């Protein structure tokens, strides 16, 4: 993508980099009705069951694949060295973080 920006080529992307970097933790779009991803449905009550189901599927896949991003955007998985037998999600910025997603096995 950055190559295309430098070459001033079009990018088939509807979001700015600022929107991308500072996006909400969870996004859910109806791509048939909203192909440009303008209306995030993740916080809407009528989407709660779908979002929960997808979050559970994601967590299952992350555990099955030992995904290093399993801790989410506020922590990093430590599973080597002192943490080899007791993997943990540690905060990125040396501040306490409440972690609920980690189930690494």
Image: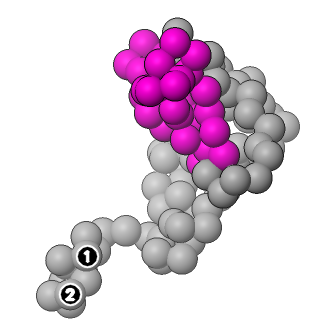
| Position in image of residue 8 (x %, y %) | 20, 90
| Position in image of residue 55 (x %, y %) | 62, 27
Does 86 appear above or below 101? above
Quadrant assignment for the N terminus: bottom left
Q: Report helix, strand or loop for mark 2.
A: helix
> Residue, x 49% and y 47% (percent of image)?
31
Q: Which of 63 and 7 is in front in this view?
A: 63
> Residue, x 47% and y 19% (percent of image)?
84
Please indicate whether residue 97 sits to the left or right of residue 34 in the image: right
Give the class, few, some or many, for how many residues have Cα within 10 Å of label 2's Cα (few <14, many ≥20). Answer: few
Task: Quickly name the residue at label 1.
Answer: 2
> Residue, x 55% and y 41% (percent of image)?
76
Q: Is residue 83 on the magenta stretch?
A: yes
**Res 63 seen here:** yes
Task: Quickly name the residue at label 2.
Answer: 6
> Residue, x 53% and y 67% (percent of image)?
21
Give the class, few, some or many, for how many residues have Cα within 10 Å of label 1's Cα (few <14, many ≥20). Answer: few
Mark 1 vs 2: CB contact within 8 A? yes
Extent of the magenta region: 63-91
Q: Report helix, strand or loop for mark 1.
A: helix
Please indicate whether residue 12 sits to the left or right of residue 85 in the image: left
| Position in image of residue 12 (x %, y %) | 30, 69
């Amino acid at each position: 993508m950055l190559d295309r920006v430098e070459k001033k080529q079009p990018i088939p992307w509807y979001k700015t980099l600022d929107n991308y970097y500072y996006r909400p933790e969870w996004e859910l779009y109806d791509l048939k009705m909203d192909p440009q991803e303008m209306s995030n449905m993740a916080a809407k009550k009528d989407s709660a069951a779908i979002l929960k189901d997808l979050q559970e599927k994601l967590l299952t896949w992350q555990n099955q694949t030992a995904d290093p991003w399993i801790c989410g955007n506020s922590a990093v998985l430590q599973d080597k060295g002192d943490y080899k037998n007791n993997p943990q999600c540690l905060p990125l910025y040396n501040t306490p973080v409440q972690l609920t997603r980690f189930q690494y096995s």
